[in-house]
Image: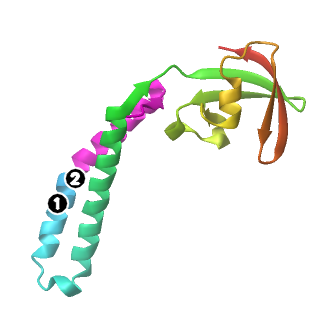
Amino acid sequence: MRRIKFTKEGFDQLKIEYEKLKVGRPEAVKELSRARELGDLSENSLYHAAKARLRSIDIQLRRLSNQIKLAQVVPSKKVLVEQNGQQIEYQIVGDFEADPSQNKISANSPIGSSLLGKKEGDIVEIQTPKGKLKLKVLKSD
């Protein structure tokens, strides 16, 4: 099976999310049980909502459990680049941690994969959906 790459911070966050859901699940089970006791299940909206909530928790727990099992912790990499006269610092992270609004980009994205292994002074040209992007690496750790 293919490993899922996470930074240490991303993996820790994944485990925290998993534990929160695990701790909250018994209350969801109790809520479903209480709703079931209210009578006719076909017209019991509280029952259907509780059942949907528990199903959602179980799905999320399975998803997170699989991600934890397949996780490979990799070091986070920061790259300072010059783009159109502006300096931008990108943090290259795993796919599930990517957040372009915070300049956290996936190692598998066009920009992330192009910057991996580059050193200070390298020029990188990347074809993106918006056109060609030219980046000069100023600093790479």
Q: Which amino acid type is shown beneath numbered disc 1?
A: Val
Task: Quadrant for the N terminus, please.
Answer: top left
Percent x, y for residue 92? 61, 28
Whole-number angstrom distance, CA of label 1 to CA of label 2: 6 Å
**Residue 12, image x, y percentages:** 39, 30
Element marked by disc 1: helix
Which secondary structure lies at badge 2?
helix
Residue labelled with disc 1:
29
- Is 22 within the magenta? yes
Label 1: few (<14), some (14–19) or many (≥20) C-alpha neighbours in 10 Å = some
Q: Quadrant of residue 89?
A: top right
Q: Is residue 140 above or below residue 9?
A: above
> Answer yes or no: do the residues labelled 1 and 2 have beta carbons within 8 Å?
yes
Q: Is 99 positioned to the left or the right of 128 in the image?
A: left
Residue 3: give x, y in percent of width and height.
Answer: 42, 31
Q: Which residue is more in the foreground, 40 or 27?
A: 40
Residue span colored magenta: 1-24
Amino acid type indicated by mark 2: Arg
Q: Quadrant of the C terminus?
A: top right
Q: Is residue 107 left or right of residue 7?
A: right
Which mark, by number, is residue 25? 2
Tell me residue 56's x, y (percent): 32, 59
- The answer to whether 35 is drawn above or below residue 72 in the figure is below
**Magenta-colored stretch includes residue 13:** yes
Asked which quadrant contains residue 51, the reply is bottom left
